[in-house]
Image (spheres, helix red, strand yellow):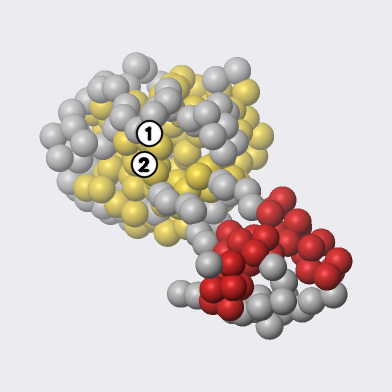
Amino acid sequence: MKNNLRSIFGFERLGTGAAFLALLACTSTSHADVILDNTTDNGFSNDGGQLSVDSYSVAQVFTTPSSDYELNSIYLSFGAASSGSANVYLYDVTGGVPSGSGTQIGTISGGPGNTLVSLTSTPTLSANTSYAVALGTGGGITWNETSTSVSGVAGAPNLGNEYVFYDGGWNHNGSSYLQMEVVAVPEVSITGAVMGFGVLVVALGRKFASAKCIA
């Protein structure tokens, strides 16, 4: 068994431990989770109102689960007559309110319905941390609202308030929540295993560069 494990991965002279670490380095353990979803009311329809982004930027605050995630995709639920396009931003949150200048993470073309954000970056979302997804002003876009609770992974995030930017700051806007779905990939660190593998290879005087991962 030991000899087979060595020969399968091309590490005939490195030993079982090195072969195991190489396998760990070549194996993906990540999967995408829906960490936030309040769009399912009436099939992505509006059940609480609509918020226009014609003249003002708008934002929805949420809090992440108890693990770090890498952002994978965002869907926003737009009204039936929605059109146009807008920039999409991710804000830090201080005291429950969006703060700082925000970072543009993509763009979106108005719906209607469940509309995918075209992401230009996929930042890390830290565990148990509040963020806000925001839309810049965009002609003709109406973002659906709901008063219904959120669903997501175990330890699902809490929805914060909905905000509108005017008079030089973010202002709380009623008791509704803007409808969106956030999908992210858990961050699984294999840095220690990879570094340990590198140290082992150096110590043994072998070359990892010639090793090939099995599909």
Residue 55 vs residue 94, the one in the foreground: 94
Question: Callout 1: helix, strand or loop?
Answer: loop
Q: Of callouts 1 and 2, which one flags the residue occurring earlier in the amino acid sequence?
A: 2
- Distance Cα–Cα, label 1 vs label 2: 6 Å
Residue 215 vs residue 168, the one in the foreground: 215
Residue 171 vs residue 120, the one in the foreground: 120
- Mark yes or no: residue 119 visible: yes
Residue 122 image offset from top left, x and y in percent: 54, 53
- Mark yes or no: residue 51 visible: no
Question: Callout 2: helix, strand or loop?
Answer: strand
Mark 1 neighbour class, 10 Å CA radius: few under 14, some 14 to 19, many 20 or more: few
Q: Amino acid at mark 2?
A: Val
Q: Residue at x 36, y 17 (%)?
A: 174
Residue 49 vs residue 206, the one in the foreground: 206
Residue 200 is drawn in which quadrant? bottom right
Residue 98 is drawn in which quadrant? top right
Residue 151 in the image: above or below residue 23? above
Q: Which mark is residue 142?
A: none
Residue 85 image offset from top left, x and y in percent: 38, 55
Residue 186 in the image: above or below residue 61? below
The answer to whether the residue labelled 1 contacts the one labelled 2, judged by CB atoms less than 8 Å apart, is: yes
**In the image, is 183 to the left or to the right of 128?**
left
- Please give the residue where the numbered disc 2 appears in the rendered image: 34
Residue 185 image offset from top left, x and y in percent: 47, 48
Q: Residue at x 62, y 30 (%)?
A: 99
Residue 162 is drawn in which quadrant? top left
- Please give the residue where the numbered disc 1 appears in the rendered image: 153
Mark 2 neighbour class, 10 Å CA radius: few under 14, some 14 to 19, many 20 or more: some
